[in-house]
Image: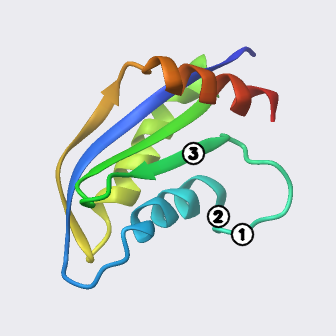
């Protein structure tokens, strides 16, 4: 199955004192089972959050039938947290830089 790149983006509001990296960590735990894990990721991904801690995105690679499942899992991770709230989230198109990142993720 050919894996291609996708983006899940979100607008979040962090509670005071919350480490912005916690948002990406929650997504990684949902997708991989742990932040630090052995072996390759089932769904290789890269998380990023803006300096102000409001704009979050995950670039991931997945095969066609799995794309909706990955989006569902990311949304679940984002919306299950108590240290931030989610104003909006969903899929969007890859930017040119994200296309390059996704190509690297495909290669492992």
Secondary structure under badge 1? loop
Secondary element under disc 3, as helix, strand or loop, is strand
**Residue 79 location (% of width, % of height):** 28, 59
Q: Nearer the viewer, mark 2 or mark 3?
A: 3
Mark toward the start of the polypeptide (2 vs 3): 2
Residue drawn at 64 percent across, 64 percent down: 33
The disc label shown at residue 46, or none: 3
Q: Which quarter of the image is occupied by the C terminus?
A: top right
Question: What number is the disc on residue 33?
Answer: 2
How far apart are the two marked residues, 3 and 1, measured between alpha carbons? 14 Å
Q: Is residue 42 shown left or right of residue 29?
A: right
Residue 58 versus residue 52 in the image, above or below: above
Tell me where residue 46 appears, x and y as whole percent: 57, 45
Q: The N terminus lies in which quarter of the figure?
A: top right
User: Which residue is the site of mark 1?
Assistant: 36
Question: How far apart are the two marked residues, 1 and 2, measured between alpha carbons?
Answer: 9 Å
Q: Are marks 3 and 1 in contact (CB under 8 Å)?
A: no
């Amino acid at each position: 199955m050919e894996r291609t790149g996708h983006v899940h983006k979100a607008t979040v509001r962090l509670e005071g004192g919350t480490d912005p990296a916690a948002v990406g960590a929650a997504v990684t735990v949902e997708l991989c089972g742990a932040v630090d894990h052995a072996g390759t990721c089932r769904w290789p991904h890269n998380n990023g959050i803006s300096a102000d801690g409001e704009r979050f995105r995950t670039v991931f690679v997945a095969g066609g039938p799995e794309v909706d499942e990955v989006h569902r899992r990311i949304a679940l991770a984002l919306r299950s947290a108590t240290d931030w709230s989610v104003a909006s989230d969903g899929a969007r198109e890859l930017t040119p830089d994200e296309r390059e990142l996704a190509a690297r993720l495909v290669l492992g």
